[in-house]
Amino acid sequence: MSQVLFFLSAIGAITAAVGVVMLRNPFYSVLALVGHLICLAALFLLLRAEFVAAAQVVVYAGAVMVLYVFVVAYVGGGEEDMLGGTALRIIGPLFALALAIELCLTMLGSALKGINTKGAPYILGFGTPRHIGKLFLTTYLFPFEVASLLLLVAAIGAVVLARRRRGLTPDDELERRIHAPRPRYTGTMAEGGGIRQELAAAQRAGLSPVETRHREGIDEGAQLAAPIAAPEQEGGW
Amino acid sequence: MNIGWYLTVSAIIFAIGAAGVLTRRNPLVILLCLELMLNAANLALVAFARMHGGEAGQVFALIVMVVAACEVTVGLGMIVAIHRRNLPIDVDELSQLNG
Amino acid sequence: MSPTTWGWLVLACPLAGSAIIALGWPRWRGTSSGWIATLAILLSFVCSVGALITLLNRPLGHRELTSTLWNYAVTGGLDAKMQILVDPLSVFMILVVSGVSTLIHLYSISYMKSDKGIVRYFSYLNYFVFSMLLLVLAGNFLLLIVGWAFVGAASYLLISFWYRRTTATQAGIKAFVINVVGDVGLVLGTFFILRHTGTVDLLKTFAATPHVFHHNDGALVAGCILLLIGAFAKSAQVPLHTWLPDAMEGPTPVSALIHAATMVTAGVYLIARMHPLFEQAPAAADVGSVVGCATLLIAGTIAIVQTDIKRIIAYSTMSQIGYMIMAVSSGAYAAGLFHLMTHAFFKALLFMAAGSVIGAMAGAQSIEKMSGLRKAMPFTFACFVVGGLALSGLPPFSGWLSKDDILGYMFHRGSWYPVLGVLGYVGALLTGIYTFRLIFRVFFGEPCEEARELEHGHLAHAEVATNPANGEVEDTEIGFPGPEHVIAEREWPMKIAMGALALLALVGGFIQVPGIDDKVTEFLSTAFPHDRLAHLEPSSSSAWTGLIVGAVIAVIGILIAYRIWIKAPQIAVRMQQRLAPLHTFLLNKWYFDELIDAVVVRPVAIFGQIMQSVMERIVVGGGITGGTVGLVRASSAAVRRVQTGFLRYYAAMMVVGLFAVGLYFLVSAT
């Protein structure tokens, strides 16, 4: 009975894995991975790892994959062109195949005594939450705490990475306020640099400096309606 | 079933995951394949835990799961940030860190 | 006070003089720096006399004294100290050097009085005297080499004193480079000898020589020949003599002091000082004798055809130093040094008189322009004649006694030395000819324009200052001679100096008249205690025979000159035409300059060019550094290609790496 279940789960896991890799729509890939995770949970159960199996389903398939689904929905990605790309398309699977063979050889050809058995004798309660919990709070307390710290860091990191930063997207209100004309000879160096250009241009046109000032009068109302583009300068803002 | 079978399955899934990382261009899918590899490692750990009769492997597998979760969080955050800047979601296009 | 204390004072005075003049240079107005310098040297002379007197007070066997100020480098294998050696030889030399220097400083005060660089001049001149005194007072090889090098430096500084003249700076460089060749010889020779004796101290080396080296030992002969190279370079012997005529670019008092009386005699002093080494290696000494003899003949023949007044006297110096080198190499130490002393007197006198003549001619130095200056410059004429007679070797002047002392010894020495003696008499004949050629052409005959003006009391003045060597126009600012020209008749310091030297040239020889007194030999005998050769004294009668022969030859020479240049001047012209190739050969100084240019200068220049274009540019620049750079660039470009920026390549490499590591462990486990 357990063998049947094993083969079903194994074949399911492998098929789902292949599906993750080969399906073009990323959304389908995510769904394939969810299936893969559930098959793996079944395999964990066969290995008497009840808590791990439960955690896999609840945390991994339940929380992490839901996060994935959200992001895929937001970002999308669409259909991917599988035929394009570099020679890695062919070499990649080859390498992977070589890796698989090698790993199998390593593990099965090794002198591990327990490979051919069904496992060591175990006490009752092996793999139950009680045992795992006890281990976490005694022998493996340090990794437990570090793991929680890691979770905290990751959460903060995610927020920092994905936050909306001001100025990265064009903010119309901000633009208008920034580019409103100010009284002359105040403000930044860029503006001061711009003065020299204006005066030079005005001189070339034959006007005196005083006239240019009056000519380009300060008319907030008219100019607030159409934001002025910032003058192009060397080493501006 | 013998433990060896589980290990074989783990190796196959690991290889499939590696192939996926090397082949796909969408960073989201690459992260998914990374998950595959992590899960394969989890399977191997739990199998060995059963082989030895100790629960250390299972504890380790849980920690790996936590790490995977964190990594996914950060990776997805990055992908969202890339999407925010209207850059193409394609690792072949995002190759400016070259020398 | 002991002789060595006087010795240190002798050294201290010119050094202090030079330093005081140099450090206070903006303050010295007019010729005050000259008076300070002269005073310093006068004090040095007084201290030399003090050293002489205190040395004579000591008994005969105790006249070699050393004194050490401090240990300079006394370590394993080397014992170099700041040490002077006061013995009759060094006292003799310091007397001559400081005495003649005092008179030349006095002369210079007038000669250089309008020169803008007068302060620099006197500082250099004092520094030169200090270095020369250091050289002769040195108690070990190291200090000797130091003095030697300083003297070379001072000579360079003073030859190119008028530094804005390119002829002067080139002459200075030529002198310095040839002197450096000699310096190398000196230092290497010292090393050869040091290796075997283990000490640089002079007295200890001489004591050890008979034990460490056997007769004509190869190492000693090599070392002595290297020392001889040093002596030849400094004393302008063939083939390292080409710098001396060019050194006449310096002011006339410099020529008088450095290139007549003192520096060029350093080689003679060296051989005399190192006589125990030369006696143990007679092969090297013979080389010295032959070269000295060759030089005196070559220089004599060249002097007959030269037309620059200072160069004639320079070749004469070369010739006379050939006599001295021949003498001290053959063992006639006292005779050679006696000639050194008398030569200092009359040669300095001749140069001073020549300076006066040049002043009268407003800076021109070619004798083709000079004639009939006798009436206009009687004092200069008298001095010139006295110097010329002493040089030619006419009785009773000092030159007669000293030169024939040398030649008499040559005949007495036996084996093949009489050949050198005969050649020496030929040289004496040539000396008479060229000396009186000079005197007759410059002072006799129709007075030239400058002479006529001077007879009317008006000193000629050139409107435009020109370089006498190549006629280039120059000004009289610093770096060039001053605007005023002086003649001896009008300057009392020059008169005193020249008069003193004329007196010495006349009577200076009387301290060593064979059969009557032997002051020089006696005095110096303790410096040469163990010499087999120094005791080879010709008997009085053979010495007198030699003297009479010498006198006769001198008279013949003067008569020949009289006939050619006074009685029948067309003989000179006809001879020049008939013997034109010979004349050209002699006028070009036996083509030594061209020979050295072809054999040494050109190959070195070509070698340098090849090195620059091939080695430097192609091999080092292109190959080694360029190649290294190219290699690094290429390899870094190759490595850079790994950083593609593609995520999947990196992932692929990770997988490949993992595979490789696993494979390694798999294989090594089997």
Image: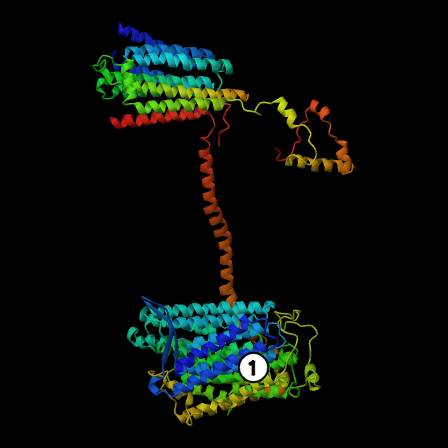
x and y percentages locating residue C562 in the rendered image: 59, 88
The residue lying furthest to the top in this view is A1
A128 shown above or below C652: above
Q: Quadrant of the N terminus of chain C?
A: bottom left
Q: Nearer the viewer, residue B33 or A222?
A: A222
C213 shown above or below A108: below
Which residue type does callout 1 highlight? Leu
Q: Which residue is mark 1?
A: C106
Identify the image quadrant of residue C464: bottom right
A107 shown above or below C229: above
x and y percentages locating residue B97 in the rendered image: 49, 29
Mark 1 — on which chain does it sit? C
Q: Nearer the viewer, residue B13 or C180?
A: B13
Left-right relation of C522 to C19: left
Q: Nearer the viewer, residue C396 or A206?
A: A206
Left-right relation of C467 to A158: right
Local crowd size for mark 1, using a 10 Å CA cut-off: few (<14), some (14–19), many (≥20): many
Left-right relation of C595 to C374: left
